[in-house]
Structures are given as C-alpha cells and as structure tokens.
Image (tube, grey):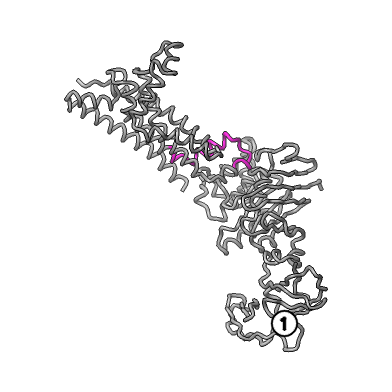
Amino acid sequence: MSNKLLKVNIHKELKEFDLDVEFELKNGNLGILGPSGCGKSMTLKSIAGIEDPDEGVISLVIDEETTYFDSDKKINLKPQQRNVGYLFQNYALFPNMTVEENIGIGVSKDNQEKTVPEMIKRFHLEGLEKRYPRQLSGGQQQRVALARIMAYGPDVILLDEPFSAMDTFLKEQLRIELANSLKDFDGFTILVTHDRDEAFQFCNELIILDEGKIIAKGNTYEIFENPKKVQVARLTGCKNISEIEIIDDYHLKSHDWGLTFEVSEKITPNITHIGIRAHDFSAAEKDEVNAFDTENSTKMEMPFEWEVTLSNGLWWKYEKQIYDHEFEIPKYLKVNPKDIILLE
Amino acid sequence: MMDWSPIFISMKTASLSILITFFVGLIVAWLLVKIKNDTLKIVLDGIFTLPIVLPPTVVGFFLLYIFGVRGPIGSFFIYFFAVKIAFSWPATVIAAIVMSFPLMYRSARGAFEQVDSNLLDAGRTLGMSEWKIFWKILFANALPGIISGGILAYARGLGEFGATAMLAGNIAGQTRTLPMAVYSEVAAGNMGEAFNYVIVIVIISFIAIFIMDYVSIRKERQWK
C-alpha cells in the first residue's frame, strides 16, 4: 500500500457567495452533493487548475507530495502539470478527431501504439476507432471520454455531473458502466452531483455543499441515516420536514402537520425541525404510538409505488407491484419513534 | 489588345494581402478572445473594426497620412531604405490588408468564441501544450468560420478601390488593379474593355468562393 492523500483547502470569492471548501481524502472516492450553483464545479475546476482559488492549498501525496496550489508559497501548477483527469458534463470530446485520435491525444507518440488499442479494448470501443464523436451514442461518448482520461494515466479523476443531461434509462445504464470502469482505478475519484442517488451509489465519503459552505461531511451512510441539519435532510431526499415545538424530552409538536410525536432520542434544545422519510409510515390502529388519521388524503399511482398526500401535507410512499391498481388508504398511519429524524 | 497587367497586379495584391490578413487576423482574434478586461476588449475591437465602417476614402486618407512621403512610416522608409511606399505597388497591398482585415478578424473571433471552452480545458487537463491546443482544437474546430472569414477578406481585398486609389493611385502597370482598370476604361468610354475586366473579376471571385466553401462544407460533413 502506498501512502496517499489528497488535501484541499480553498477559498474563492464568487459573485453570490464565498466558496470555502476543506477536506482530506485518504483513499477511494468522494462525492460532493449540492444544489446547482453551490460551488461544486468550481471546486473541481480549482483542483484541475482550470480555475484559480483566491487562497488556500491543494496538494496530492502519492508516496511523495506534489503541491498543485499554494497561495502563500505562490505555487500554482498549470493544468498540464497536474496529473488530473476531468470528465466534463458534456464529455468535451474533440469533434474534429476520431475516437482513436481522441483517446491518443494525451499520450506520448511512443506509447500511442500500445495504449490506444488497450483502451479501445478495455472500454469496448472496438470497431468505432475511426468514428467521430457525433456519430456515437451517449454511452459510447462517455466511454471514449473515460478511455481518453485513463490513457493519460491520472492520479485523480474528477467527474462533473456526468449524468445530468441524460434521460432516466440511459442514466441508469451508464451509472453501472461508470462504476465498473472506475473499479480498477486506484487513484482518487471525486464525483460532483446534485442527485442523491448518484452520490449514495458511488461514494463512500460525502461532502454536502450549500452556497459555498460545507454543511455536512463524512461517511455517506451516516449522513443519509442521520442528516442532522435541515438542508442536509432535504438534499438527501427527506420529503417531510416540519418546524417543531418541544413538549418534553421525548415529545414534540410539529407546526406544519399539527401532530404530536414521540421520539426515541432525547430532544436537545438546538432541535428546531424534524424530518420523516416518505417511506417510513405504516398502517396503524387508532391508539398506537404516533398514529394519526388519514382523512381527506389523495393518492396517485406510480409504476412501483403509491404516492399518498395527506390533508396535513405529509407525503407517504407505499411500495406496490406494477399490476396492483387497487389501494385503500388505511384509516390510520403511524411512524416509528426511531424513524423520526431530529434536525437543527 | 487587352492589357493583362491589371489582372496580374490584382492577383499578386490579393494573394499577398490575404496571406498576411489571414494569419495576423487569426492571431489578433485569438489574443482578443483571451483578453478578460471588457473595456480594453471593446476599444481594441473598435479600432480593428473601424476600416469596414469608415468610407474607404477616409481610410485611404489616414493611410496616406501615415505612409505618405511625409508620414511617420513613409518618411522612415524613404530615409532608411530609400523606398517610396505611397503610389507604388506595396501600397495596393497595404490598402487591401487594412480594408480586408476587419472581415477576417471578426469572422475568426466569432468562430473562436463558438468553440466550447470545455474543449480547451479538456486539452489542458490532458497535458496538451497551449500551442497544440490552439491549432488542434481551437483552430481546427473553428475552421469553417475561419475559412468563410478568409473568403470574405479575399473578396474584399480583390475588390478594394477607394483606399487603394487614395494611397496607391491609378498608375497603369504598377498600381492599376482590376477595379481601377474597370473604372479607368469606363471613364475613357471603353465599355468593351471594362466588360472584359468585369468578367475576369467575377470568375476569379466565384472560383475562390467555390473552392473555399467546398473545403469547409466537406470538413463539416466529415465530423457529422
């Protein structure tokens, strides 16, 4: 095992807000999740050297340390001198070059003969060598873009919203492909996305960015299970969020839904909101804990779930089989006290 | 007997001037795209575009002022090289360059700006030198626009009249280009002679446009 570390600590003034990002990555892949325009892409571009931060340090250790950027020491390596691969949202394949020319562009003349066919084979692009990017499907374009990056042999791969411009079907297929292609890569990967599914699927470490500030950082599973903050809960896909009033250590009243809940964790004074995921409700009897009635709710049928909107504004998603078209909303619903997420 | 010299003079003038206009226009366009200061950009753009906005005689007036025997550059050449620029063949080239430059420069700049900046950044992260990025990505992808700029500039240089008349005059066998010859023949009442020159200009212009269009259409087709 070699000694690896990617250190990023940057500050940049942007038009609407200041970007402050600080993290250290020891191995594997990091996800940066955030709404569009939160500074995610700017962070990636700073690491690649396409944009310059105002202040800070970016350095990469692979056995020995290379400083990419250091505002105090006035170091700022050109993108050409950093060993970083960047997968652009639109792939940025060179339209005037064939597939093999695109793949070979970052490789020295002597190695082209060996590397290019190797990459063509590895990314299943046989027979497409002489095609131009416009003659390829979205999936093939992505593979060429990845092959081009891999041929260059980077230490860090940056993925900038690689699936955001695609339809759902292609997206799911390409996610699997991308995950497979990156499996053998032993450098760092950073994926930037606004899609929580992508972040969850690809990354074992996660940073959540909002208006240029990190609002959550850590293990992906832990952040999804316990988002702690309202914005984090929202970005990890929590549909029901309400402001609350604390009644006692284990009871609270939600303002938005007009319901009183019991929770399993002690409520500290900094808790201002709760979140309940749309899947966490179940049918109940009248007198059970955290049960409430479902009068005047509306239901909508989706292929694999029923979406129920209660009159108080709560969302409930109930899984179903595709051939089930009948569904009676239970008279009462409940939520398990341990499924109520306390938020500050 | 028709005098062939205007044809040769025009071909020589248009060819040399397009060679210079093309490369200088390309480089100036690239530099302007790279400038980040908006005010500087607008001022420079104004200066480089002025020749197509001003009446050609006004441009010719300025050129005469600069390149004439008493002008700063004109007197310099006379003093150091004993060469008179104004009313000699090089003057036709200078007039053609200045008048056709804005067309080349503006087309190239527009074409450069159309190229997705991600392509350039992708080239940088793949370790390509800035020189290689310029030729292989920026220039190559802007080529159709650059070629059409070249066509326009060539045609403009070939047809240049006003500024040429001011700076180079209308000396038969020296500075009498095709448009000058057409004017002179008509002025002398030789409509038949003028007609011959007109035909030559139309043919040359058409061939030039045809060749360049053909090249740029083929290039675009190839990538699609």
Quadrant placement of the N terminus of chain B:
top left
- Nearest the viewer among A114 and B35 is B35
Point 53% across, 55% down: residue: A137
Residue A236: name its quadrant. Answer: bottom right
Q: Is residue A79 magenta?
A: no
Residue B23, image x and y in percent? Answer: 47, 30
Reply above or below: B109 against A161.
above
Point 67% across, 78% down: residue: A257
Residue B38, image x and y in percent? Answer: 53, 40
Using residue B24 as the reference point, say whether residue A38 is left or right of it: right
Point 78% across, 44% down: residue: A61
Residue identifier under label 1: A334
Residue A232, image x and y in percent? Answer: 71, 64
Q: Chain of mark 1?
A: A
Q: Secondary structure at mark 1?
A: strand
Q: Is residue B127 magenta?
A: yes
Using residue B181 as the reference point, say whether residue B215 is left or right of it: right
Q: Which residues are magenta?
A: B122-146
Reply above or below: A245 against B148.
below
- Nearest the viewer among B57 and A282 is B57
Reply above or below: A44 against A230.
above
- Nearest the viewer among A299 and B78 is B78
